[in-house]
Image: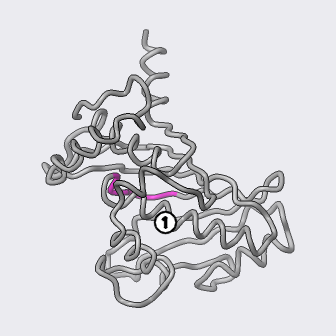
Amino acid sequence: MATDRTSQANRMNCLKFDSLGETWINLVNVTLQAGLSADRECYELLGVQVSFPAADQPDAVVARYGDSHMVAEMDKVFFSEEPNSLEHNYASLMSGPAGRRDLQDVIDLLRTRASSKRAVVTLCGPGNGQVPCINVVQFLNRQGLLQTIYFARGQDAFRKFYADGLCVAKMARRVASKLDLLAGRVEGFIGSSHVYHCDREAIDRFLLQGRSFLRKNDGNGGG
């Protein structure tokens, strides 16, 4: 019985789908369902793994339920140093193996050592006590595909996960294209997946309207 419960918990914390959007809605659902209330402001689920394709493909869930303004502003966070409404920036905090603040380090490394495990960019705070939500992104050339792995200290599953995911997938495609590879999957490990109590009404509506995309037997219950 204990083994069955452990297996079920592990399955709930490992979300692998054929689209980013399906991963998103199921991440929101499992965070709400299995998460615990933290700091009276959110439900939080620890140690969640996600997996979705890096390919630029039609996504019914993101297209219907995503916020285009959030997508545009998150793109600025990752790829531009111009001001954005989220009031933070990853482009200036990124550092590759040789210290360059872009993806060129990992591209050059994988050109010279295709199987390298050191093709990593880190995102560190500027020393003011602030730490980016996404901290490490690794690129691996395996069996003709560029596989991408990231670690996030925490992600707002409802409002920001899908926008982050689009940007990490875009990073993967940029590196893959420079190496004449196909982009494989994005695999992520989220330390704290959370949804905020103030978003509960919008979340319930999202899960109800998008229920056909939910993994079977997960339900829509709160944490």
The residue that appears at 24% across and 30% down in the rendered structure is 221
Horizontally, residue 137 falls left or right of residue 8, namely right
Choose top left, top right, bottom left or bottom right for residue 71. bottom left
Choose top left, top right, bottom left or bottom right for residue 126. bottom left
Query: Image height check: is 77 above or below 193?
Result: below
Q: Quadrant of the N terminus?
A: top left
| Range covered by the magenta-colored residues | 151-157
What residue is shown with label 1? 135
Horizontally, residue 63 falls left or right of residue 101, namely left
Query: Image height check: is 164 above or below 185?
Result: below
Q: Quadrant of the C terminus?
A: top left
The residue that appears at 65% across and 68% down in the rendered structure is 120
Which class describes the residues within 10 Å of circle 1: few (<14), some (14-19), or many (20+)? some
Instruction: Assign a secondary structure to mark 1.
Output: strand
The residue that appears at 34% across and 35% down in the rendered structure is 211
What residue type is disc 1 on? Asn
